Image: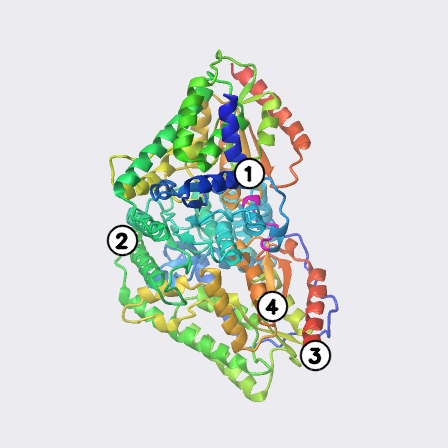
Amino acid sequence: MENIVAMPTSKPVFGNGERANKLKSTRFGSKLVNDYWSGVFAAKEQGKKVVWYNGTYIPPFFHSHDLVWVHGEAWSAMLAARHREIGAQARGEQRGYDRELCSYARTHIGQMLIEMDKAKAGEDGLSLDDPRIEAMMKLPPPDMIVNAYPYCSSGQQWDDITYRVFGKKVPMFTIQIPLLWGGRQDAGYLRGEEWDQRSRYVADQLIELTKFLEANTGRRFDFDRLSETMGYIKRAAELRLEGMELCTARPSPASFFDWIVSIAPMSFLPGDQNIVDYFQGVKDEIQERAANGEGAVKDERYRLFFDGMMNWNKVGWLADKFAQVNACVVAGRYTHMSFWQEPQLIDLKDPVLGMAQNYLVCPNNHGAPIMIGEIEKLCDKFELDGVVCHASRTCRGMTNAQFLIAGSAKKYGRQAMFFEGDVADESFYKDELLNVRLEAMVEAMEAKRRAA
Amino acid sequence: MDQILNLMRYAAQSPMDYAAAWKERTGRQVIGLLPMHFPGELAHAAGCLPLVIQDDAEPITVGQAGVFNFYCGFNRSLIDQTMRGSFDCLDAIMFGDHCVQLLGTADTIRAERPELPILFNQLCTTLDANWAERETIGTFTQLWKELESLTGRAIAPEAASASIALFNRNRTQMRELYELRRQGRIAISGRDMQLVVKSSMVMDKADHVALMDRLLREIPRVAAGSAEIPLYLSGHMCHAPKPEIIDMIEECGARIVNDDLFVGWRFIHADMDEARQPVEAMAHWYLEKNQRVPCPTRTMQGVDWEDYLLSDVQRSGARGLVILMVKFCEPHMYFYPEIKEAFESRGIPHLLIETEHEEMPIEALKTRVETFVEIAKRRATEAA
């Protein structure tokens, strides 16, 4: 099914008409991502087994076992970012998936159905120069399915459907990453009895995952290689955090949107020297900008926090939108509270427990009090004026606590705003609603500043 | 029989009033249970009234400030009830599910009612994992301790065993009623069957058992054979569908013969093994009941909801399936195409009705259901 919707090439005039001053070093990431997908498409020709997975950043286990991995969310996000999601979603809807269902899942399942349609019609086996491969529209089918979703029940059900679409024959392994509710007396961020119990529980399941991989490949799992892979990831994560730290500068040298485009290297790209180089490049550029007083937004006047899942078909659009009112979105829950956010927990001699703990601290897997406490720390650290909540229609995992988050922002004197959209279904995004709300938010922040 | 149903109706329609009166009368604590899989037996053994929290009929008003409108009606109702103070008589809430919407609701209740203890113990959802039994026993053991701490009293294993036996008896009674309905030996409306199960989720268990004894004795037996087309209801995995929908389906010429609704067969189908230690019995009950009535929120290979429905529709003698899907219920939205295709491939008529907390256009739905009933009748005639 072809995507027949033409996207507008020009944007309506809004605010000062400025564009976001994006980091240039992140372009290296595009090459890495393209190389990664090329590797995925070549997997079967190279005789490699393919794992489809959803949820947290578990690829180091696959990388260490010489497997090729496909992240369903990354696939859907990539299709959405390239405005190629509509055909996939339409195919899903044709089978009966309601549009209120997670749009990541609808895109992924829909594209899966398209590929199966082709296979049934004898149209698979496309050559490598096929334009659909260029457009990254063809995935090798899975030899294994792994599900490892913190917090969100929808993710587990999505993989159950993947398992069914492939005829209930592909071996599947489901890891439970339970919510850290934080209700016991000693509960806190990275501490308490519940934290210790849950860390061990997830770590035990990860060890079971290595046995599952062994059983389905006939090869022993190499824990030394896992440590080696995690060495690169840990270093990249440290560099990323150091780069983020530099954004306390005014103007902020990088924005939330730069960190959004830097998710792939932390989330699913191979743990090797490339990701270290990527984040070294990002940090160096940020350092240079900070020294020169160059901001991610020209004439930065307001500094904001972004709460919620990214609207993947609007990344550049939103980056410019905020720049047009001199607002720099400096930090966000999705970018700053996840993706190997606590690298010091990883002991390279025995990394599994620390990996489990990083999986547990994903941006929505804490009960609201602890999670909101961490958001407030970020808002204080980066001296933010307001919180923008993206009410992503089909991603309830990220919208769950947003009324409480907005309430907390207001309690601490920050402006709060909601706008509607979705992770991968553009039809839920209403541009003019964002425009008027953002203008009103800016007015309110300005008035508050004058009054002070 | 009317008197029995009236007593059940009061508890089912005004659960919090019932609970407040019970609390006043007994001086004991009331524990709210969130669906779908947490056993009330433990709270009962602790001397409390376990009450499965229900959606109510009120439109969402103040709750709008705490939840988005793209959440299911049950979650929105829970938040609305919290903000209206409807849960004031609860002494604690037990949460155990992993439904992403319910997790958000748990946090909102905590924020709105910080003084209300929430005993949050998330159940293992990978039921065929080799750690599932160990983890589930751990979860119920933790809950046991938390209940002891809440009430300030130890729960004796013998008390837990007695509660298990009492709950088993109650479920057995309701299954007997279901079986009589399936066989066409009693004429009980879908609305009244819902009352029976819903009141069992709310009432003092011993009282409900006594009422069920009377109901099973007193409910009039009828001759088998009916002009109505037998239908099966499926869906609504957390709360009861509006009785008006069930009334409407029956008014269209259908007779409900079975269901897999949460406020229905899903709630009563499985007993706990009285020969086991109580915590072990609860863990096995939880881990094994999915094999009997699959739940799409659990993962277990080799167990399929659509296969279960195909076989249970056939076993019940139903000539069609009415799927009641709660708007915004993600697990149901994922699995609906599986069910649809399975029923289409077998040529069994099925009808999807999306239900909402508010704005159910019953008259508009009626046209669809009437048509469906006609199709089901014609297919049944052709098959005969």
Relative image position of residue B173 (x, y in whole percent): 39, 26
Q: Are marks 3 and 2 in contact (CB under 8 Å)?
A: no
List the single residue furthest toward the top: B223
Q: Are marks 2 and 4 on the same chain?
A: yes
Measure how far apart labels 2 and 4 are at the Cα level.
Answer: 56 Å
Measure how far apart labels 1 and 4 are at the Cα level.
Answer: 37 Å
Measure how far apart labels 3 and 4 are at the Cα level.
Answer: 17 Å
Query: In the rendering, which numbered label is found on residue A451?
Result: 3
Measure how far apart labels 3 and 2 are at the Cα level.
Answer: 69 Å
Chain identifier of the residue bearing label 1 in the image: B
Residue A403 placement, left or right of B259:
right
Name the residue tied to disc 1.
B325
Q: Nearer the viewer, residue A435 or A139?
A: A435
Name the residue tied to disc 2.
A218
Q: Amino acid at mark 2?
A: Gly
Whether residue B260 is visible to the viewer of this picture, yes or no, is no
Q: Residue at x 46, y 66 (%)?
A: A338
Q: Earlier in the sequence, mark 2 or mark 4?
A: 2
Name the residue tied to disc 4.
A410
Q: Residue at x 32, y 41 (%)?
A: B282
Measure how far apart labels 1 and 3 are at the Cα level.
Answer: 52 Å
Q: Are marks 1 and 4 in contact (CB under 8 Å)?
A: no
Q: Nearer the viewer, residue B283 or A45?
A: B283
Relative image position of residue A32 (x, y in whole percent): 48, 69
Q: Earlier in the sequence, mark 3 or mark 2?
A: 2
Q: Residue at x 52, y 36 (%)?
A: B240
Q: Amino acid at mark 3?
A: Ala
Magenta-highlighted residues: B66-74
Kindly report which numbered mark, 1 or 4, lies closer to the viewer in this rendering. 4
Q: Amino acid at mark 1?
A: Met
Kindly report which numbered mark, 2 or 1, lies closer to the viewer in this rendering. 1
